[in-house]
Image (tube, rainbow, N blue to C red):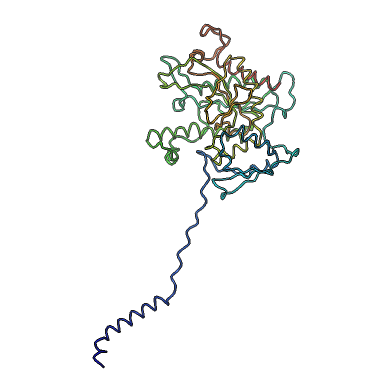
Amino acid sequence: MSSFTKRYLPLLALTALLLGVLCVFLLGPSPAPAPAPEERPPEPPALSMLATRPDWAELEIYQETISRDEFERLLTTVFTTGQAWQTCMAIDDAGVDIQMGNSPDEGIFRLRFASSGQVEKAPRHWRSTAELPSAREGKPLEGLRIAIDPGHIGGAWAKMEERWFVVGEGTPVCEGDMTLQVANLLKPRLETLGATVSLVREKAEPGTTARPEALRTLAQDSGTPEDSPAALQRLAERLFYRTAEIRARADLVNQKLKPDLVLCLHFNAEAWGDPNNPTLIDRTHLHLLLNGAYNDEEVRLADQRFALLKKLLQRTHEEEVIVGSTVADSFAKASGLPPYVYPAESPNVRGVPDQPYLWVRNLLANRLYDCPVIFMEPYVMNSTIDYPRIQAGDYEGTREIGGNMQISILREYADALAEGLIRHYS
């Protein structure tokens, strides 16, 4: 062996070894491909608090029940206040494509318009004024199914609801208790007139089984800026007495009672500040609310967009206007209350032409109740005009209050509302 070979043999061996390893690496089996990214389910549609995903198939029964002109008129002049509907609805001469979720990728519902003169009747469980059977003399409301919804809960829940205040040593003013008193006065009066009447709430207790404690996690996960313990507690309470409670009442109305008309009874108020030392104001007024005026944020929510379309397609607005107009006129005549006027810049309200007492707003109750809804807002609880009458409570006949002989404000409410219904349905 030459000296050269001896000298470089270790180096040659190492080189050969490295070349062998390299060949194995290059010629060996290819590495397994990287796993494909896991397919994520589509993002759920944006929904209102405690809402469930709508079943868009429910709108199939409204195919070809409305013309394009009528659909666009109601959509743009009654049911919306902005332009956001254009981001989730595409209208053409034959129909409208409606996003069922947050984007077109999550599905499109196609609603076909009726051809000119070929409009089918929209199916629904409630009957309009024109569809009611003829009533016997003295029974103008015969055949009419009415659900009375006494607003709020009252009783031990009134302070939590923020519908309670007390002036000095006076009797506390509790809206939920007052609306129930009016309902109990109104129900037998309407039954005597022939109506079938149900109370959505019969006592000062909630209809929902949910409670604030169970809703606290939802409040924490809601993404609202209310992150202090006190703020989260208030949000959980609102979810209980407002959202969960009204949704429970809607289930009762829609699944069991199925009325032709819902009367939501409320007393209005203006900001009173400290409920133990409230501010009283020197004005009072009356207005009635009909469903509509969905703002851009509400239209973007799948459940509210669905509810808007269902209300529009059922033509609830037309019935609410004709019933509400007569009720408002009768109530104004009996009570002497002037109309409430919303500020011109209000983004979530529309007026009703030629009717100063009627306004259109998207409230949870008049959105969820699956029939025409007349939402009453008479009087002002913290008014120097109405407060003394509220303190007097219920009584028969008249009493001198504020220098005038007046009937009980509770009976005036019930009588004026009943008279409006008599005038309308007679």
Q: Quadrant of the N terminus?
A: bottom left
Would residue 338 be found to the left or right of residue 131 on screen?
left
Q: In this view, does 386 lie to the left or right of 137?
A: left
- Number of residue marks: 0
Extreme bottom residue here? 1
The image quadrant where one finds the C terminus is top right
The quadrant holding residue 201 is top right
In the rendered view, tell whether residue 85 sits above or below residue 192: below
Q: Residue 111 in the image: x percent, y percent?
A: 66, 43
Above/below status of 285 relative to 103 = above
Q: In this view, does 409 lie to the left or right of 158?
A: right
Residue 311: % across, % down: 62, 35
Say if 199 sits above or below 414 in the image. Answer: below
Closest to the observer, 213 or 231: 231
Residue 169, percent from left and from top: 41, 14
- Judging depth in this view, the residue of 296 and 247 nearest the camera is 296
The front one of 360 and 7 is 7
367 vs 30, left or right, is right
- Quadrant for residue 65, please give it: top right
Q: In this view, does 375 lie above or below 211?
A: above
Quadrant of res 138: top right
**Residue 404: image x %, image y %?**
54, 7
- At x 59%, y 37%, the residue is 307
